[in-house]
Amino acid sequence: MKKTQKFLVPIYGLRNSLRHKIKLDTGLSLRNINLLEKEHEFFRKYGLEGDYKVILEIDYKYNSKDPNEPLPGISFNIVNRFDSSLVVFGDGKVGVAAIIPSPKKEEFPGGAILHSSKTHYGESLKKDIDDKFKTYYEKFTKAYEMRPVAFDTFRRSQDRFANNDKTIDSCIVLESLFVPKGERAKAPFILVGLKIMNFDSEEVILIRDLIDYRNSIIHADRKKQLRLIQERKFTSGKFEKTFKLVRTILYRFVQSPWS
């Protein structure tokens, strides 16, 4: 039996409100939080204390006889993709805080809290969401369908703290983008792919060193890890620069995807 449930998905890390509602797809819209409807208070009932400015509103159609619907089905079918689109869109801390059934149509009880902490000053998305985001999201949807592993892995890596974990995640992203199925020699495909995409020699070297560092982690080569750090091939600043470069590579793929 088909049902439709409206969900509200508050977004953390946006600096500004929207100028107007943005329809991304059928049953999928971005809008400002409704203060008159006291939506802030509604979210606080779920333990969400953040200063949310924008909500993703979803009219979700699902099969009520499916035990995976509407949760976690809505996460796999819509929310994960949208969350990935935010973290690839630009630098900064941004993402989906929760998936909550609308109080006006709560046939489905309960929800899912994904991120309840407040973002700190300066941690927000460095870009504003505007009408251009609709065009970007249309392109992103196509790119996501082609490489879901790359985008989902990058999204999850944003919650990682250790550089070693982020390094492994970043190499999975790059392998998903560049390496043909069944190939064992991964680094040559990645590095040649970057050159084809017109990344400069310094950027290619950053990724080459990242792959080298990843290999030292995977093979538990602590001497090599220490040597790479001692040679200052990797400092905290260089790690950050490299991870930002991985985001740039994903963004370029969204603009011009390849099969």
Image (tube, rainbow, N blue to C red):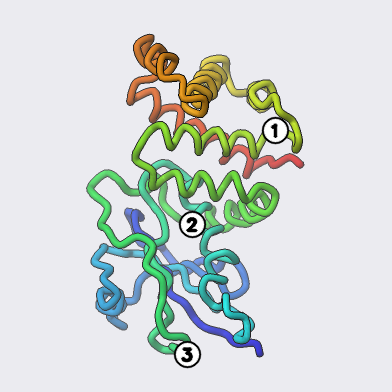
Q: State the image quarter where residue 254 is shown.
A: top right
From the image, tell me which residue sits under label 3.
Answer: 107
Q: CA distance from mark 3 to mark 1?
A: 45 Å
Q: Residues within 10 Å of mark 3 (few under 14, many from 20)?
A: few
Mark 3 element type: loop
Q: Is residue 142 above or below residue 218?
A: below
x, y (%) of residue 38? 27, 80
From the image, tell me which residue sits under label 1.
Answer: 179
Q: Residue furthest front?
A: 220
Q: Quadrant of the N terminus?
A: bottom right
x, y (%) of residue 67? 58, 80
- 182 vs 231, left or right, is right
In this rendering, the label closer to the viewer, 3 or 2? 3
Nearest to the observer: residue 5 or residue 156: 156
From the image, tell me which residue sits under label 2.
Answer: 83
Q: Residues within 10 Å of mark 1 (few under 14, many from 20)?
A: some
Decide which of tag 1 and tag 2 comes sooner along the chain.
Answer: 2
Q: Amino acid at mark 3?
A: Glu
Q: Amino acid at mark 2?
A: Asp
Q: State the image quarter where residue 235 is shown.
A: top left
* Labels 1 and 2 touching (C-beta < 8 A): no
